[in-house]
Image (cartoon, grey):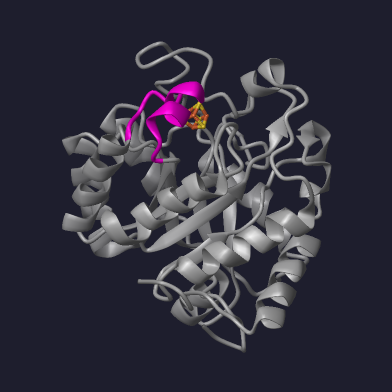
Amino acid sequence: MQGGERYNSINDYLKSAFGRKTVKLSLDAGFTCPNRDGSKGYGGCAFCSEGGSGELAAHTPSISDSITEQIDRLSEKWPDAAYIAYFQSFTNTYAPVQRLREVYYAALSDPRISGIAIGTRPDCLPPDVLALLEEINKEHFLWVELGLQSIHPDTQSAMNLCYTTADYDKASAALSALGIKFVTHLILGLPGETEDMMIESLNYVCNSGIRPFGLKLHLMNIVKTSPLYEAMPDYIPFASMDEYVDFVVTCLELIPPDITIHRLTGDVPRKILVSPEWSYRKRSILNAINRELSLRGTHQGAKSK
Ligand code: SF4
């Protein structure tokens, strides 16, 4: 934890790794998802948007053009930044390995790119893909992001995830055995989940399974283009921002201090956000989390095992 921060943010980690502000460029490489094309399911996870949870990603026919588009958008704010190419939309290990090789190396061969991050599902890491990731990891900066969302089978089934906690265990063990950093995604506020259930998922990831390099805690967002909005249009994940902030601080206290924190809010464009209506105020939410940590005199890992 640097600069008086009370949690171990990925921004600080990257600044120290690359010696300057480091920004992730969200890319859509044109993949699909086994939960959409019928090989595992149809319709996608209940909370997923039409854009495969990547509405902010650049999607042009060429990876280089997508990188340029994102850098043009961000360079005014951060003129001297280093850049990580983040393959975000849909399932970014779900294609023949030769296609994956082309896509990943198109980014890695760009001199403006310092490393890559790859978002995927835990059931989409076959041996040939793991071998490619191992090869890349030996020469380049890499992490893999694994959607887990919840360890609870009833939630996994209700949300139509079409993967299990056992898939996550296998994926995290395989990545860890190869020395590849991975980041686990959990969603706070899934329908039917109590705070105790969310904490069980968090504790499982931090203490029972193989400990990840990083964690993304997503605030459950209901978005207009998701099956969940069709099924539960009035669902509100947390009654207020204060309630959410209070719970996130409780979670941070339980997360071991060596785990990097990649996200503590939701991140969807306002035009498709239905609820919580305050979710688009990311800066306010993060400020409130910092304020609450300070008020409680606590920090990440204060109550970790
Ligand atoms: S959340 Fe990920 S795994 Fe689920 S449908 Fe969307 S792209 Fe596929």
Q: Is residue 117 visible?
A: no
Please state if 3 lies on the left or on the right of 109 as rendered. Answer: right
- Please determine whether, in this image, residue 124 is positioned above or below residue 160: below
Residue 247 locus on image (x, y percent): 63, 59
| Quarter-of-image position of residue 220 | top right
The residue sitting at 70% across, 21% down in the picture is: 232
Magenta-drawn segment:
151-164
Q: Residue at x 71, y 73 (%)?
A: 292
Vertical arrangement, residue 159 with respect to residue 7, above or below: above
Report the number of numbered marks. 0
In the visual, does 79 lie left or right of 54? right
Magenta-span inclusion, residue 192? no
- Residue nearest the viewer, comparing 171 with 46: 46
Q: Is residue 192 above or below residue 225?
A: below
Measured as percent of width and height from the top left, residue 67 is found at 59, 50
Q: Is residue 158 above or below residue 178?
A: above
Which percent across, then down, holds residue 238? 71, 45
Residue in the image at 82% along x and 48% along y: 278
Q: Is residue 86 left or right of residue 229?
A: left
Q: Which sits in the foreground, 61 or 173?
A: 173
* In front of the other: 271 or 219: 219
Residue at position x 34%, y 31% from top?
99
Report if residue 172 is visible in the image: yes
Percent of width and height locating residue 305: 35, 71
Residue 161 on the magenta span: yes
